[in-house]
């Protein structure tokens, strides 16, 4: 039975990796993989020889003594446990996505464009790199990439020039997302899974992540693509479409940033704080929208206008539900492998056979090479299941160096290929960037940044 489940997982994973070739959205194989894996477990529940207790992070003792009803009950409890943990991540992401869409409803991101006055290609590169680095730490790397490329399209009309900036934005956004608990899905998973805390994440990863961004941008600034000035024809300034754009930008970003503070003070799961932030932002959005609506339309008291003009409803209709369903499928599929103890056994094999590179992790028995390979692997395959698997493989305590290294490697390693991160995939779609062009011109910069950041982490972890 275990072999069949592994085959199903591998085939599903392969379909996810080859989604562009197969022209099938990756959420479909993820959901199929999840459902089939758990169906096989349910059908063969009496045949399994081991079961992994995620709460205790240990194999269940005396599994062979349990009767059919007890085994079914154990399976249902485990499924419910994993669904609860997965739902915490999904609800958190839904809240964050909705706040970002509310900001966009009021054209809040146009405020950022107003700050950029220079026409020097080199200065614009540095401005966008730092914007991507810090903005991704607040609104996540995927959204930051979408926002900045959208602004870039209004600043630089030549696509051949623009794709170079898009490539460096991908590197900077992924680096920025690694040191923030809300900057990348994988970091959020580790944070919600109580593997890292906000303070330690910043202390351990800010400098490595900053170097991961700075080195590629510094090297790129000497390339011909970033020399000279932008020669766009004069165009009308794109002013924000709403008088409340700046207010909603600051309210939305402030609401998202407040979530780690809320968690620290209350010790409640992060999604509770995100829902509070969403409610707070939504109040102002509704007030501003209703005020504008009342001034702009001759309303009929008997008509139901709220459902058609509510910015919250509009934002909810635009969020990326396919991404949410993909995360549901992949996380629950990985949970199936974890529940059968497959990941636990795989981790033990890795720790026994991989050579040790670092010194700090020797006593824990986990190789730096394993984590570095995870970073490289995240460029080829999705980093979400890799981190999900690591949660079931390793049992190190909260804020152990291992978890922070995994956060860095999985978060920044995907920049080496354009399909290796959500930020890269969305940039590829927005600018029609060729896979091999990115590999030739940007991939080596991302690799240099990744390695420099990894070396920096190996030094910083010895200090704290």
Image (cartoon, helix red, strand yellow):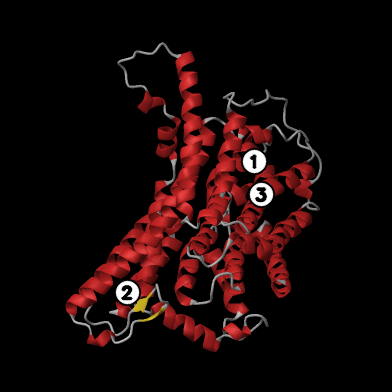
- Is residue 185 toward the left or the right of residue 123 in the image? left
Q: Classify 434 as above or below 116.
A: below
Q: CA distance from mark 1 to mark 2?
A: 45 Å
Q: Earlier in the sequence, mark 3 or mark 2?
A: 2
Q: What secondary structure is found at the residue carrying circle 3?
A: helix
Q: Which residue is mark 1?
A: 159
Indicate the quadrant where residue 42 lies. Answer: bottom left
The reply to whether the C-beta atoms of the residues labelled 1 and 2 are less than 8 Å apart is: no
**Quadrant position of the N terminus in the picture:** bottom left
Cβ–Cβ under 8 Å for marks 3 and 2 = no
Residue at 68 percent across and 25 percent down: it is: 237
Q: Which mark is residue 134?
A: 3
Question: In the picture provided, is 76 more to the left or to the right than 341?
Answer: left
CA neighbours of label 2 inside 10 A, class few (<14), some (14 to 19), many (20+): many
**In terms of depth relative to the viewer, which is nearer, 134 or 397?**
397
The quadrant where residue 151 appears: top right
Name the residue located 52 percent from the left edge and 58 percent from the top edge.
Answer: 188
- Give the image quarter of residue 238: top right
Which of disc 2 and disc 1 is earlier in sequence? 2
- Expressed as whole percent of the image width and height from the top left, the position of residue 229 reads 79, 38
Residue pointed to by mark 2: 5
């Amino acid at each position: 039975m275990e072999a069949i489940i592994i085959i199903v997982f591998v085939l599903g994973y392969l379909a996810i990796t080859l989604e562009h070739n197969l022209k099938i959205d990756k959420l479909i194989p993820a959901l199929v993989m999840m459902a089939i894996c758990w169906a096989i477990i349910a059908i063969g529940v009496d045949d399994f020889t081991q079961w992994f207790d995620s709460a205790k992070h240990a194999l269940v003792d005396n599994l062979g003594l349990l009767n059919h009803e007890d085994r079914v009950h154990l399976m249902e409890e485990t499924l419910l446990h994993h669904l609860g943990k997965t739902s915490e991540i999904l609800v958190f992401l839904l809240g964050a996505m909705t706040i970002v869409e509310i900001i966009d409803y009021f054209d809040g991101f146009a405020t950022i464009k107003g700050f950029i006055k220079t026409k020097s290609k080199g200065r614009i590169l540095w401005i966008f790199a730092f914007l991507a680095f810090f903005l991704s730490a607040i609104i996540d790397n995927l959204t930051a990439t979408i926002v900045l490329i959208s602004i870039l399209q209004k600043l630089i009309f030549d696509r051949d020039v623009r794709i170079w900036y898009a490539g460096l934005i991908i590197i900077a956004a992924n680096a920025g997302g690694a040191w923030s608990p809300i900057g990348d899905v994988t970091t959020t998973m580790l944070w919600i899974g109580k593997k890292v805390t906000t303070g330690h994440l910043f202390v351990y990863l800010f400098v490595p992540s900053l170097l991961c961004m700075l080195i590629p941008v510094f090297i790129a600034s000497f390339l011909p693509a970033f020399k000279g000035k932008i020669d766009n024809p004069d165009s009308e300034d794109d002013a924000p479409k709403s008088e409340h754009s700046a207010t909603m930008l600051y309210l939305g970003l402030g609401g998202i940033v407040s979530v780690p503070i809320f968690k620290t003070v209350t010790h409640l799961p992060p999604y509770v704080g995100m829902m509070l932030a969403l409610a707070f932002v939504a109040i102002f959005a509704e007030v501003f929208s209703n005020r504008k609506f009342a001034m702009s339309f001759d309303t009929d008291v008997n008509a139901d206008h709220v459902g058609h003009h509510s910015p919250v409803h509009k934002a909810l209709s635009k969020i990326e539900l396919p991404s949410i369903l993909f995360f549901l499928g992949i996380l629950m599929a990985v949970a199936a492998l974890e529940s059968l103890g497959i990941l636990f056994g795989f981790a033990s094999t890795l720790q026994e056979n991989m050579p040790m590179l670092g010194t700090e992790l020797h006593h824990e028995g986990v190789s730096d090479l394993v984590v570095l390979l995870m970073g490289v692997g995240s460029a080829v395959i999705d980093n979400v299941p890799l981190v999900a698997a690591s949660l079931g493989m390793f049992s190190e305590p909260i804020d152990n160096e291992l978890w922070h290294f995994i956060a860095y490697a999985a978060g920044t390693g995907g920049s080496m290929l354009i399909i290796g991160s959500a930020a890269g995939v969305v940039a590829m779609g927005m600018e029609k960037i060729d896979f091999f062009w990115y590999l030739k011109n940007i991939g080596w910069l991302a690799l240099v940044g990744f390695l420099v950041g990894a070396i920096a982490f190996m030094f910083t972890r010895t200090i704290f």
